[in-house]
Each structure stands twice: as structure tokens, then as C-alpha cells.
Amino acid sequence: LTAESYPQVKRQDFCQITPQAVDFFKSVVGESAVVTDPDDLLFYNEDQMRKYRGQSSLCVKPKTTQQVSEIVKYCHEHKLALVPQGGNTGLVGGSVPVFDEIVLSLSGMNKIRSFDHTSGILKADAGLILENADNFLAEKGYIFPLDLGAKGSCHIGGNVAANAGGLRLLRYGSLHGSVLGLEVVLPDGTIYDSMNALRKDNTGYDLKQLFIGSEGTLGVITGVSILCPARPKAVNIAFLGLESYEAVQNTFKRARSELCEILSAFEFMDRQSQWQAKRFLKTLHPLAQDDPDVDVPEYPFYVLIETSGSCKEHDDAKLETFLESVMEDGTVADGVVSQDESQLKTLWTWREGISEASNMDGGVYKYDVSLPLPVMYDLIEVLRARLDEHGLRSISDASKPVVDVVGYGHIGDGNVHVNVVVREYNKTVEKCLEPYVYQWISDHHGSISAEHGLGFQKKNYIGYSKSEVEIALMKDIKSKFDPQGIMNPYKSSSAEANGSRFD
Ligand code: FAD
């Protein structure tokens, strides 16, 4: 979708990029770090779901914080809008321009600055790829407190800007807890630096928190200081089949109490998501019991439980006792446990692959939702029924725009991902889903964005999750930091997002 698809969004009164501006940026970062070729710009203009496409004619790739500061200062003085971009893996259209905003890519800033072996504090450039950070830490016996399916491409700065939750949140909590300090270039070019912050420091407001989850609207994150835990020595995965959503909730409750301190992830997937993953991965499903004729076994729900600890014998025994008890009393119908590192990775792919698998038919409408556990799965069933009522869904009939609705997510964090898999992006489908889905979530006391942010997709729907007072405060903060609104305009809670649920 390009800006023409959204006639209600008007280009704001920013200046146009001039040849003098391009020359200035080249003088700051060097010619090779300025992208102007339209083919090369496509990557920076289009989001990873291929749902949103901007029209920027310029991407600048600085290598130092000083360079970022000079670029932003110039944009401030010349009223040029810009979009900070990390790995461009975000799922709400926040990382790409809407019109002709300059893309400021952090991909050239990818160095580890320091690592303290005693405290586990890592300091690094914001453009460091998450997987590279974790691999570095693995060699030192530490782990990055965040993991997610896009780890091979996303940046740690992008993770912080999005306040990504991911697969380890159940164990290590949110980035609001583990990020200790940040270096940020503010919208006028000033450098805010709290990289030397300590774990405990109650002198005044904790300003860094404002940038965590700010989605590039308050400044450009250039450095991250983060507290990393010791890497667990023993990791096990159990992949289970269950007969009902109630059994999923019971298993979660039991896992929390019986696996307790070694429980590190509790992820759930419905059968439809596994069917989608099967079409994508094209390998034997973990519970197909070596029978290639079995597509995806008939269980309506699947759960992936991960345990992590420091003593393998202890963890193995604890997991075995837990699995025996939930299988004996019928809470869990079927299951396998990873036997080695490669099986562990394979089992994770059936969960991590769903996001990419959902995009394979042509597109996906994604809803990333927090809801009270008892009603969480109702949302998926309600949406399937609604799409059926409107004659829009069929797995086999290619003339229908919607293939299916798949549900999966971090049930341990009360967060479900609802992916409406489509053969093409289609206004009729969009209108059938929105704002209905947001109203339903609001009526059930949920959040319309658990971990992906608002971006371009949800900026006008913030009122379904936040009160008028909260929205007004956010607008005040935005205009204090960025009075001209140059930093990632048309997104999130930025000044022009009106926050009204009736728009
Ligand atoms: P981008 O996509 O480039 O940017 C995201 C936002 O942050 C944009 O608004 C951008 O302007 C801003 N931004 C980026 N870098 C900076 C910076 N240095 N300074 C200021 N602003 C910046 N998210 C989850 O929370 N949990 C998951 O489990 C999860 N799984 C995913 C799985 C897959 C396969 C994919 C594709 C995405 C997934 N995501 C998940 C989405 C997630 O938000 C991103 O993958 C990641 O956190 C974004 O990092 P990025 O570097 O790609 O940022």
C-alpha cells in the first residue's frame, strides 16, 4: 500500500530534499553511505510484510553517533522529515516512510562497545543485529534477554525502539527492566547519553524509559546498555498436543507451579497455525509420529514449553515428572521432548516459522493483542465467524480473499497473535476486520498492541487502549521533544495522530 491508498493521510508541510542536502549528507557520511538509486531504495521503502511502501528518494547510513547528530541537526534546521530504521522487520509499518521522508538506517552502526564479564552489562551500537549480540554473549556464558523470530535481521536499537517482547519475556521480563541506559540523538541533534547508568539510580525521572517503545518518534537511538543474564546450561523443549483451549490454560497454570523457576517459555499455537507452518516448512510435524501421511495431527491446540536451568539432571527430572502428571490425568493428549540441540531448534521452528508462513499466500493482516487469558482465543473464533458471515474466507476456494485466521503467541505473557492470512490485501477484508477487531479488544479490556507498537497501522486506533488523558500527555511529550514533528511523522502517537476511536 502506498500513500495513495490512504487519501486521508496528507503530506505535512516539510521541506523537499534538495541536491544541497544530499551533498551535505555525503560530506558527513561519505558517498557510499548515501543511497539514491531507486532499486536500492526499495528495501528501505518497503516493510517486511510488503504491506506499506513509502516514496523516499534518500537513505543515509551513518557510522557514528556524531554523524547521526549532524544529519539530524541539518534536518531540524531545514525542516526535513526522517524515519529511523533498524533491520526493517517491524510489523506495523513504522519503519518505512509514508511519503518522501529521509530514511536514516542504523545498519552501519553495529559494533560492540564493551562487555563487563562480572556484571553482564553489554554496551553496543544500536545497529548491532540481535543474533550477533546473542552469539557474542554465548561465547562469554551470557544470553541476550530478548529473542524473537527476526533475530537474524533486527537490530537491538530497533528492538528497544519497538520495546519488543518476544520469546524470553516470560523469564527475563521486558526491555523496560533490562535496558540500563541509552544514547539517543534528539530531534534537534542534541545527544542524550545515559550509557553509564547504573542498575540502581533514583535521581529524578528515568528518562530512558520514554525512548523504549517510542518507535522512532522521539529520537534516534544510537547506543544501548543492557543487563544480560547468565546463559542457562541446560535447555529442554516439550512440544505438546492438547484437546481444548481450557486444557492449554490448565497446562500453563500447572507448568508455572510445577516447573516454577526453570520455566522459560510457554508458547501456544492453534491447529490452523500449524497447518500454515507445515505448508511453509514442508517437513514432518513434530507430533506426526514419523508418518509422512499425517499432515498435522488433529489436536486443536499445541503448546511449546521451554525449561532453562543450570543442572540438566535436575531439569530433566522435573520436566519428566510434570509431563507424566499432565499426560496421566489427560490434560495433555500427546507430546515429544527434544533429545538434542538440533531437535530443540527444529521444535522452535514450528513456532517461530508461523510469522513468515502467514505471509506466503500474498499477505497478512496482523493483530498483536493482549487479552485476559479466558477470552483470548474467543477473538480468533469471532473473527473466523465474521469473515465467514461476509463470505470472505475459504482455505480451498482461491476466489475468496482470506485463506484462514491463525492464532498463536506468547500465552505465558497474555499475548496472542492473530494472523488473518490473505491471498491479496483487500479493502473489503480490511473494513470487515477494522475497527471491529479493536472495539472487541477494548470491550474485553485488552490492548490493541501487546508488543509490535502502533506504527502506521494502528496510530489512529490508540483510543481503544489509552484514555484521553494518556493520549494528551503523549502528545505533550512528543511536541516537547520534537516541536516540528520531523521524527517519524504519521506514526504512533505523534502529533497528528488524533487518537480518536471514531475516525
Ligand atoms: P525496524 O523494523 O527497523 O523499526 C521498528 C520501529 O523502531 C520503527 O518505528 C522505527 O522507526 C524504529 N526504530 C528502529 N531503529 C531505531 C533506532 N535506532 N532509533 C529510533 N527508532 C528506531 N516483535 C516482538 O515484540 N515479539 C516477537 O516475538 C516478534 N517476532 C517477530 C518475528 C518475525 C519473523 C518478524 C519479522 C518480526 C517480529 N517482531 C516481533 C516484530 C519486532 O518489532 C521486530 O522484529 C523488531 O523488534 C524490530 O527491530 P528492527 O531493527 O527490525 O526495527
Image (cartoon, grey):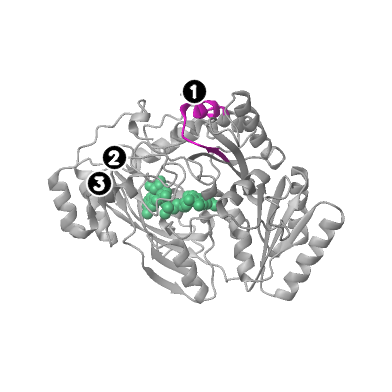
* Residue at the image position 81 percent from the left and 51 percent from the top: 331
Badge 2: few (under 14), some or many (20 or more) residues near its Cα, within 10 Å? many
Q: Secondary structure at mark 2?
A: loop
CB contact under 8 Å: marks 1 and 2? no
Apparent side of residue 420 relative to residue 480 in the rendered image (left or right): right
- Residue pointed to by mark 1: 502
Measured as percent of width and height from the top left, residue 159 is found at 46, 54
Secondary structure type for disc 3: helix
- Residue 194 on image: x %, y %: 39, 60
Real-space Cα separation, disc 1 to disc 3, in angstroms: 38 Å
Q: Nearer the viewer, mark 1 or mark 2?
A: 2
Residue 261 visible to an observer of this rendering: yes
Q: Which residue is mark 3?
A: 38
Amino acid of disc 3:
Pro
The Cα atoms of the two marked residues, 2 and 3, are separated by 9 Å
**Secondary structure beneath disc 1?**
loop
Residue depicted at 59% across the width and 25% down the height = 391
Residue stretch in magenta: 419-436
Indicate the amino acid at tag 1: Phe
